[in-house]
Image (cartoon, rainbow, N blue to C red):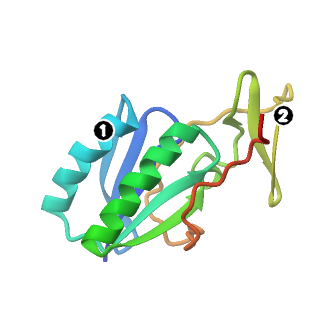
Amino acid sequence: MIEVLVISISKPLLIGVYKNKELIEEYKLEGKTSDLLPSLFSNILKEFNIERINYVNSPGSYMAIKVAYIFLKTISITKNIELMACNGFEFNQNSPIKALGKKYFIQNKNEIKVDFLEKDDIIRDFKLPKNIKKTNFNKETLPIYNLPAV
């Protein structure tokens, strides 16, 4: 089974192609998600017979999440490919994720809050895992907005 994982909530944009849950191809791209996804997916769809697309739907850059969702949902519908979603904390060792201004999304157990960093907080980069066997993907693919309305 061929799957694609898209992490668009920070820079660089990370996309991994997985065969039987093992990473076989990795892309790290700088730029806007809206510019990068269409051309890269055009090539990926030509090269691989994708059966499932996984993406990070929370938390992080809202614009990147929205763009990724609309693009990937369209691909999912038109190509009849399953779409799944996952929390971004799965790919940065549960490190705080940039929110707004000097605030960060911080996950404590199953709760996500928005707060300032503590002195001992460590910010880790997002990484594509070598395998996705234990990743907690789910069918709730709509973007999740963790910030309160302004």
Is 18 in front, or is 101?
A: 101
Q: Position of residue 19 (x, y in %)?
A: 31, 70
67 relative position to 126: left or right: left
Q: Position of residue 60 (x, y in %)?
A: 61, 40
User: Mark 1: which amino acid?
Assistant: Leu
Element class at badge 2 = strand
Q: What SS does tag 1 mark? A: helix
Q: Position of residue 67 (x, y in %)?
A: 44, 45
The residue beneath circle 1 is 36
Dot 1 alpha-carbon crowd within 10 angstroms: few under 14, some 14 to 19, many 20 or more? few
Q: Is residue 81 above or below residue 88?
A: below
On-image quarter of the C terminus: top right
Q: Residue 22 placed where, x, y %?
A: 37, 66
Lower sequence index among marks 2 and 1: 1
| Residue 19 in view, yes or no | no
Give the farthest residue toward the top: 101
Disc 2 designates what residue?
115
